[in-house]
Amino acid sequence: MSKIRVLADHVANQIAAGEVVERPASVAKELVENSIDAGATRITIEIEAGGRRLLKVSDDGEGMVRDDAILAFERHATSKIRVTEDLTAIGTLGFRGEALASIASVAKVELITCTEGAKAATRVTIEGGRMRDVKDAAHPRGTTIIVRDLFFNIPARRKFLRSEATETYHLTNLVTHYALAHPEIAFTFVNNGREMVRATPAKDLRERAYQIFGEEFLENLLEVNGGETQVACVSGFVSAPRDRRTSRDSQFLFVNRRFVRDRMIGRSLSEAYRSILPHGVYPAALLFVETPLEEVDVNVHPAKTEVRFRRQAAVADAVREAVRAALASANYVQAQEQEQVYFDVPEVQEQVVTATAAVSSITPQPRIEFIPTPPPPMPPPIEPSGEEIARDIELMIQFAPQSVQSVQSAALPPLNSAEKFAREVTSETLSKNIRPLGQLDESFIIATDDEGLLLIDQHVAHERILFDKYRALEAERRSESQQLLVPETFDLTPAQAAVFDDLAPELENYGFELMRLSGRTVAIKATPADLPPSEARNMLAELLDTVDAEKKSTARETLRDEIAASLACHAAIKVNMPLAPEKMRWLIDRLLQTSSPTTCPHGRPVILRLKRKDILKGFHRI
Ligand code: ADP
Ligand code: MG
């Protein structure tokens, strides 16, 4: 007997739904794309319970006539392509004709739609893939689709949904993406009855970014404009190197105005920041790559979030060069020749360079002045005159600040090569008998212990002390706070607003006093005792951006650690800060009393040791 049979439509749709409908945000993505394809000028997205209970998208696009409204739910029903050739140049966001069929097979869907001048609108209800009802309704030109009880008929899938906060985060992120990609369209996003985004039609990306992220964010952005039409035009904004993120969450990447998760573009972006951002730190970016339609295949993934470029390497180059040019025009990277000079460190200085790596790689703060001397402009005379020495010094000072960063992270070998000199002090080899001698570059405490010479990173040491203190106070519910004379206000981005309510009570346990004002504005009324008020905003922004939406609901302890670590980092003394001998003594004594004196809350080493044995060896004494 034959064993192969053709699957019933509703089974096939549910299988397709597995690929298209991963979570509420993927439903929203398909619906919003349909609205954009329908020429909408206004799109409203409303959600309840993270989009599981309700997800509603309304637009004022061209709408559908009754027959189309019914047909739209058939598999492979699309108005966007007709013949195979159309696949080679897709100008619409949708084209597979399976989104509505897939969504309707795993939820309770209501569609109300009306075309221009039609006598009545049409309402179609469909549940778990079964058409329930079709009748007249009232609706202005455009379409509203309401998706209720996602995965109501597939309990296994429902189980995979994350917490409401996580799903809301993904939805917010999605709306932000589309709002950025289409400044000309008005977007409204309502979460549990609360308006999270309201963006009126904007004239360009800059204005739209301002509506969504606020003025402060925009001020720090550099404009990107590069590439070439035949391969890829690259435009948008990237952040200045001082504005750092620890995740890629602030990178919004688009190909032909389609929101994509493209590793290649992300990588090219990072490459552009090579030598000016440390490893593991990411820039914020709103980057639009425009290629001729036939240069890119968007049909490689059912959710269409991945694309394939015909000339991948050329596109990567275009992205990197465009971003690099933006950084260069703001003087963050130097002209090619100048870089060369500093990469080309003379051999005799190698030892010094290695030592620089040892020192500088334990902290990402790039402002360390212990750098190799740039090569003199001419061959040095046998006995340089006082004048020449003076000029050398002048040159050194002149070039020092810019050359630090490139020498540090681009031209130098990774820190392993320095290991033979100074090693991390581990808790087993830590001695209680540490005596401070002075400071190196006003950043590192030079000290001795019974085994040799120590370098203690003053910033991370203080970070560790404060981290332990904050955690202890929080555990005992004894936070100390300082009231601000004038409350600082702070504008949340939509994504930050989505996590804010969850995070606020935790922050208050640490001594923050926060008040949600109208819309997405927050007032900071009090800050934790040791935190300089000027750091409060930075810290809040960083936490709201990096705290993983997952962690909020699952591991409270992890979240509390993250807050304490961030607080400690912002409140701790910085590098490039002179310390009086008593201060150094105090810092070391307190460090030794902490739970883990040899590593900072972010896992970096606190103390390096140059052993006496190695010193003796270096001087050929043993
Ligand atoms: P696709 O977008 O790939 O064509 P969908 O299943 O998402 O497939 O939608 C099927 C069809 O329904 C679309 O091709 C379009 O003609 C119509 N449609 C869907 N949503 C809308 C909308 N919001 N406004 C007008 N037409 C729509
Ligand atoms: Mg579609």
Image: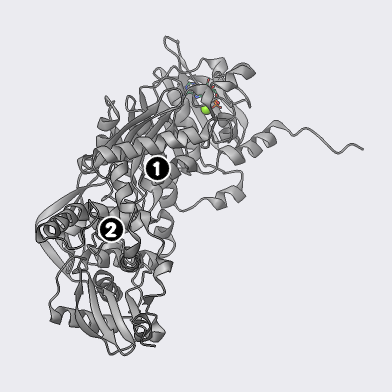
Q: SS class of the residue under badge 2?
A: helix
Residue 508 visible in the shown view: yes
- For the residue pair 106 and 400, the one nearer the viewer reads as 400
- Location of residue 486 with respect to 294 vertically, above or below: below
Q: Residue furthest toward the left?
A: 485
Mark 1 residue type: Leu
Residue 591 picture quarter: bottom left
Compared to residue 269, the image places residue 428 above or below, namely below
Q: Determine whether, in the image, residue 91 is placed left or right of residue 180.
A: right
**Label 2 CA crowd tier, 10 Å (few <14, some 14–19, many 20+):** some
Return the residue found at the far right.
1
Q: Earlier in the sequence, mark 1 or mark 2?
A: 1
In this figure, which residue is indicated by the disc labeled 2? 504
Query: Which element is circle 1 on?
Result: helix
Residue under label 1, please give it.
269
Image quadrant in which the C terminus is located: bottom left
Q: Indicate whether 383 appears above or below 21.
A: below
Q: Are marks 1 and 2 in contact (CB under 8 Å)?
A: no
